[in-house]
Image (cartoon, helix red, strand yellow):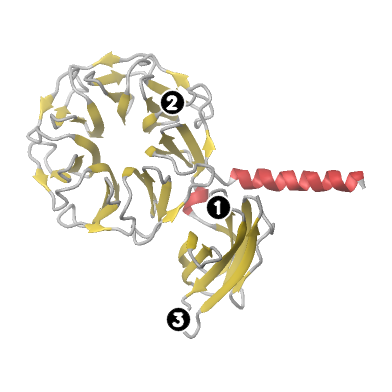
Amino acid sequence: MKKILFILLIVHCTLLIDNCLSQWVLVNNGMGNLVVYTLSASGNNIFAGTNDSGVYRSTNNGTNWTQTSLNNRLVRSLSVNGSNVFAGTGADYGVYLSINNGTSWSQTSLNNRTVYSLAVNGNNVFSGTLIYGVYLSTNNGTSWTQTPLNNRTVYSFVVNGNNIFAGTFENGVYLSTNNGTSWTQTSLNNLSVWSLAVNGNNIFAGTGSFGVYLSTNNGTSWTQTSLNNYTVYSLAVSGNYVFAGTGFYGVFVSNDNGTSWIQRNEGLGNLNVNAFCILNNYIFAGTFVSLYRRPLSELTSIQPISNEIPNQFSLSQNYPNPFNPNTIIRFKIKDSRLTTLKVFDVLGKEVATLVNENLNAGTYEVDFDGSNLGSGIYFYTLEADPETSSGFRETRKMVLMK
């Protein structure tokens, strides 16, 4: 009897370990619980800008961190250009430069501004400042010139070919097509834009309180996406996936250019996400309580179990059931079509969207984390074009027991 109990305990612990792997993990060894405002990567180096403790560096995918010699500044922004690492600081200390991956730093001649954002385009380095707009250096920070965008607070940049987009405080997005010689305010002109990202011809703007906007024509027009009532401090892109880091609501992911979004906070909770960085198949999230990491594959795809084409749709019973707090849901799709998998409480209120994308025929499984839910009965529903004659809808019950 003792042997059976021991084996069951091992199996139970193994399931817990496996489930815990499918989540955000705190990676702050050597850094501690510092606020991480910004992240940037070069080669196998990842740099983290912190609140009042300067820049930290990791060479092993965030497993360990070392404080660089820039160790007593609030670092709002980071950008990398070859072997040069630029750090934009708060409290009017301007821009610092390291030419040796953070071993040593020197303060550039832009030394009396608070720098919220940095971007590099070829030999041009752009600094977005508090109140004084955009500065440009063409010689790695030896000298700086204030551009005509000179009376705005600039929170963010993104570079798309010859186009430089600047996100500002309460004045939306500006565009320069000539390396800052001139700037044009786009039609997104009355919101604070904390973050910007580019994916092909798509430009994403993360705003204060109004979520994410999308432009498909270089800022001529903008459309508010369905993530429309959050402050979005950070954005990142990987393939067809867009990641949005929000204030107090964690991370949202879209695989259809913002038409739909799924909240993915397993292990993270509803934290402020200030910055993203993607390196070596990991995505890093800088938050107000340090740094988290997750395998990119966990967010960019549900797990395909088999490519064999099933002869019918089906939704399996989750396992384990009852569960606490993770469970696996497996289902089969017999042909390619738009598929959704959603979780509802006993009152019929939707509490999670696990899948919302076009899937090819095959067998899939999804890990559901109920950490943010209370104990009780929940229902999960799989739909595949349910309004058509060949559509499918099925609902099953599961029990969360904490």
The nearer-to-camera label among 2 and 1 is 1
Amino acid on which the number 1 mark rests in the picture: Leu
Amino acid on which the number 3 mark rests in the picture: Glu
- Gap between marks 2 and 3, in whole Å? 50 Å
Which residue is depicted at the point 45% across and 83% down? Answer: 388
- Gap between marks 1 and 3, in whole Å? 30 Å
Query: For mark 3, what is the residue?
Result: 387
- Compare marks 2 and 1 and give the one earlier in the sequence: 2
347 above or below 32? below
* Disc 2: CA contacts within 10 A as few (<14), some (14-19) or many (>=20): some
- Gap between marks 2 and 1, in whole Å? 28 Å
Is mark 1 in CB contact (under 8 Å) with mark 3?
no
Q: Please state the horizontal and vertical placement of residue 168, each as a whole percent of the image.
A: 18, 40
Secondary structure of residue under mark 1:
loop
- Say which of 89 and 51 sits in front: 51
* Disc 1: CA contacts within 10 A as few (<14), some (14-19) or many (>=20): few
122 above or below 237? above
**Residue 345 visible somewhere in the drawing:** yes
Query: For mark 1, what is the residue?
Result: 373
Which residue is depicted at the point 62% across and 63% down? Answer: 330
Q: Please state the horizontal and vertical placement of residue 363, each as a whole percent of the image.
A: 60, 66
Q: Please state the horizontal and vertical placement of residue 267, each as a whole percent of the image.
A: 54, 43
The nearer-to-camera label among 1 and 3 is 1
Query: For mark 2, what is the residue?
Result: 34
3 above or below 221? above
Amino acid on which the number 2 mark rests in the picture: Leu
Quarter of the image where one finds residue 274: top left
- Say which of 266 and 48 sits in front: 266
- Compare marks 1 and 3 and give the one earlier in the sequence: 1
